[in-house]
């Protein structure tokens, strides 16, 4: 796992055979509050990576 110094980005990398799976979570802070973005990237030898934006279902504090 890699985390940025500001703790606004975390990256998890998993390898399985020739496939590499990367999950990245980015937290963006603005005057309207926080927004969280989650991306999944899948790559393998000889193929370009495919990336999907995922929904973040982290419970928010009331």
Image (tube, rainbow, N blue to C red):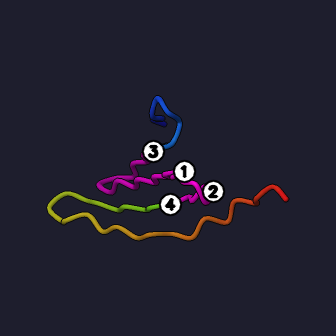
Please name whichever residue, 59 or 17, is drawn nearer the observer in this view of the structure.
59
Q: Is residue 31 above or below residue 10?
A: below
**In this rendering, the label closer to the viewer, 2 or 3:** 2
Residue 32 percent coordinates (x, y):
61, 60
Distance Cα–Cα, label 2 vs label 4 = 17 Å
**Chain-order first, disc 1 or disc 4:** 1
- Asked if the residues shown at circle 1 and circle 2 are in contact, with their CB atoms under 8 angstroms apart, the answer is yes
Q: Which residue is mark 4?
A: 38
Q: Residue furthest front?
A: 31
Residue located at (19% from left, 65% from top): 48
Residue 61 percent coordinates (x, y):
81, 55
Disc 2, SS: strand
**Chain-order first, disc 3 or disc 1:** 3
Q: Which residue is mark 2?
A: 33
As for residue 42 lying within the magenta part, the answer is no
- Asked if the residues shown at circle 2 and circle 4 are in contact, with their CB atoms under 8 angstroms apart, the answer is no
Residue 30 percent coordinates (x, y):
54, 54
**In this rendering, the label closer to the viewer, 2 or 4:** 2
Disc 1, SS: strand
**Chain-order first, disc 2 or disc 3:** 3
Q: Which residue is mark 3?
A: 11
**Residues shaded magenta:** 13-37
As for residue 29 lying within the magenta part, the answer is yes
- The label on residue 29 is 1
């Amino acid at each position: 796992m890699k985390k940025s110094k500001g703790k606004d980005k975390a990256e998890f990398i998993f390898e399985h055979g020739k496939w590499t799976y990367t999950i990245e979570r980015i937290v963006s802070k603005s005057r309207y509050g926080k927004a969280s973005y989650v991306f999944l990237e899948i790559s393998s030898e000889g193929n370009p990576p495919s990336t999907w934006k995922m929904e973040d279902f982290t419970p928010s504090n009331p």
